[in-house]
Image (cartoon, rainbow, N blue to C red):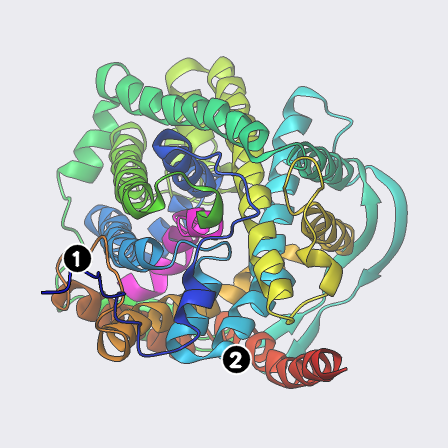
Amino acid sequence: MSTETKPPTPVAVSDWDIHTHQDKELVKGLGLTSATMLVMGSMIGSGIFIVSAEIARETASPALLVGAWVVTGFLTIVGALSYGELAAMMPRAGGQYVYLREALGPLWGFLYGWTLFLVIQTGTIAAVGVAFGKFLGIFFPSISSSNWILHFWKVPPIPIGPMVLGNMDVGLNTQNLAAILVVVALSIINIFGIKTGALIQNVFTIAKASALFGLVLLGIFIGRNAQAVAANFGDFWHNAGLGAQHAVQVGVGGPMVMVGTLTILAVAQVGSLFSADAWNNVTFTAGEVKNPNRNLPLSLAMGTGVVIALYIGCNFIYLSALPLMGSANGVTILERGIQYASEDRVGTAVMTQMFGSLGGWLMAGAILLSSFGCNNGLILAGARVYYAMAKDGLFFRNVAKLHPKYKTPAVSLMVQMVWTCVLCVSGSYGQLLDYIIFAVLVFYILTIFGLFVLRRTHPDAPRPYRAIGYPVLPAIYIVMALFIDVVLLRYKPQYTWPGLMIVLLGIPVYFLWSRRSGAATAA
């Protein structure tokens, strides 16, 4: 009887090993703690302190305000559990780009990477950087969007159907200069090794998660306001029945129509989904995660779970400190309520209600920490996607080069930095982010659909972790996310059609780039 060991049976697709082996040239510098901090730090920005005002105006119901965050939490955690299988299966730099490429084909991977570079990642970095500048201006009033260093021109509003393009200032002011300096500094710092970037991420994520937790604790013990508690929890289910009707404006300047509770909850997801987004960024760095088969699924599950719990807790604190219903003409914080908090800064209004002007300063400091740490995570992670695209011949060739000493995608970090700074100066990042909420959700749907595809096309591929609740939970995610996208397509076309156009513009770019890449390879 022969004792010769037979080689393992190869996976059906011949290039599976090529595409799914870990990147050998990258440094394994992220452990479980750092990976989890990257998930949490990329999620927590300034949105949790702001978007509840808009959600409150849309829903006019304490229960639906919380419900919007619960729906977002469910989708986020189910998405993370599903991505955990893909991440453990394909621990490669590029993450979601790789999953789409392997499951649905290179075109879909490219369209995701194209949209990520053009708008999603860079636009978010720009917006978070400008938010940093805005709150830094509370401490240093000379930092302001109206304090111009170079003002080139103001683009007038241009109505196109349900959209309004333009209406933005192009130039350099002290506020976006602060954003640019932060982006440049963090991009350069992240060249000096994954461990350096991870250290910054860990410190700032712990700080801002502690600040959120502190806000919840303060709200529980000293922030309760009898008037707000009576108004919000005395009639918690106000306007929340399935038969209730809610007014929503179709597009920009369109007619007001009445919709049901489920529809208004879907409309309200624009703010909460954006605030909880970027949890997938840890998958971009998979090639640098130690023991990725274990640490990637764990970091996704733990990071999203903790942040969603903090987000829901914060909204209960908002409801216990301020009445939901307010007046745009209200003079005091209580009169304005959550709906009309000054400049939508609900977190600042709550802290001011607790501690007076000192509370506003404390919250501004917390948001500075949050914005800085969030941008570090976004900058660190995003560069890995363009690096992976360049390795596939679908982005500038030099972007695939690593720093000779630190083994980081230095060129990719610089290219991302330059485009982000352009968005900061152009003033377009706010509109761009509005446009891509729909597209982001489409790519999440496609990626989770890819989980089903890979189960069928690669049944023997190694799966160290299998998605909890498969196939039920991923299927529920797809149905819910599709419903939200259809509702946004119908009632918020200003958020949908432009994002869809940005994605579709990538199709001819893909064929041009792949043809050029093929010609270069042949040569």
Q: Is residue 247 above or below residue 410?
A: below
Q: Is residue 364 above or below residue 110?
A: above
Looking at the image, which is closer to me, 266 or 14?
A: 14
**What is the count of numbered marks?**
2
Please, what secondary structure does the residue beneath circle 2 have?
Answer: helix
Can residue 294 be seen? Answer: yes
Q: From the top left corner, tell me how far across and down residue 483 is, in percent.
A: 28, 74
Q: From the top left corner, tell me how far across and down residue 344 is, in percent.
A: 48, 42
Q: Amino acid at mark 1?
A: Ala
Tell me if 279 is positioned left or right of 157 in this view.
left
Other-residue count near label 1 (Cα within 10 Å), few / some / many at <14 / 14–19 / ≥20: many
Where residue 338 sits, quadrant-wise, is top left
Report which residue position mark 1 lands on.
Answer: 240
Report which residue position mark 2 lands on.
Answer: 107
Where residue 5 sits, quadrant-wise, is bottom left
Other-residue count near label 2 (Cα within 10 Å), few / some / many at <14 / 14–19 / ≥20: some
Question: Magenta: predominant secondary structure element?
Answer: helix
Looking at the image, which is closer to me, 514 or 304?
A: 514
Q: Amino acid at mark 2?
A: Leu
Whether residue 40 appears in magenta in the rendering, the answer is no
